[in-house]
Image (tube, helix red, strand yellow):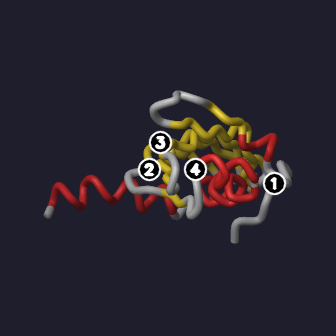
Amino acid sequence: MVIVLIATVPHFVLTRSDAYKLAVKTARQSPEFEKTLGPPAKEGWFSDGTEEEEGDSGKAELLIPVRGSLRDGKLRVLAAKDNGRWRLEALTLELQKSHEHIDLLSSATSAKPLDVK
């Protein structure tokens, strides 16, 4: 039981963060995300990474597992928080097996900062 808690607590902490929410919301706005993975595309378990916040600034580096009916992969996220607002610096879908990388930030319908609350 303790091992399960140790393994899942970091995942739940990251999934509640605004940087994580912004990354997932932006990925879903990209037509490439679901088309590449196959519907329904969704986040998996055991996200990894770091997020540091100090007041109105911060940075995050996240690796979010994703899967669909056709393929599995990971979202690689680089985000920065300036003046209390998160923005994505990089959002890449890294596909397993093919080792293909797709830039979702440039293909999202809006690369502007999004509200996540």
Q: Are marks 3 and 2 in contact (CB under 8 Å)?
A: yes
Q: Which residue is mark 3?
A: 49
Choose the circle earlier in sequence order: 2 or 1: 2
Element at label 1? loop
Q: Distance from label 1 to label 4 (Cα)?
A: 24 Å
Mark 4 nearby-residue class (10 Å; few <14, some 14–19, many ≥20): many
Choose the circle earlier in sequence order: 1 or 3: 3
Nearer the observer, 53 or 9: 9
Element at label 2? loop
Q: Distance from label 4 to label 2 (Cα)?
A: 18 Å
Which callout, 1 or 4, points to the residue nearer the camera? 4
Mark 3 nearby-residue class (10 Å; few <14, some 14–19, many ≥20): some
Q: Are marks 1 and 4 in contact (CB under 8 Å)?
A: no
Which callout, 4 or 2, points to the residue nearer the camera? 4
Nearer the observer, 31 or 91: 31
Q: Which residue is mark 4?
A: 37
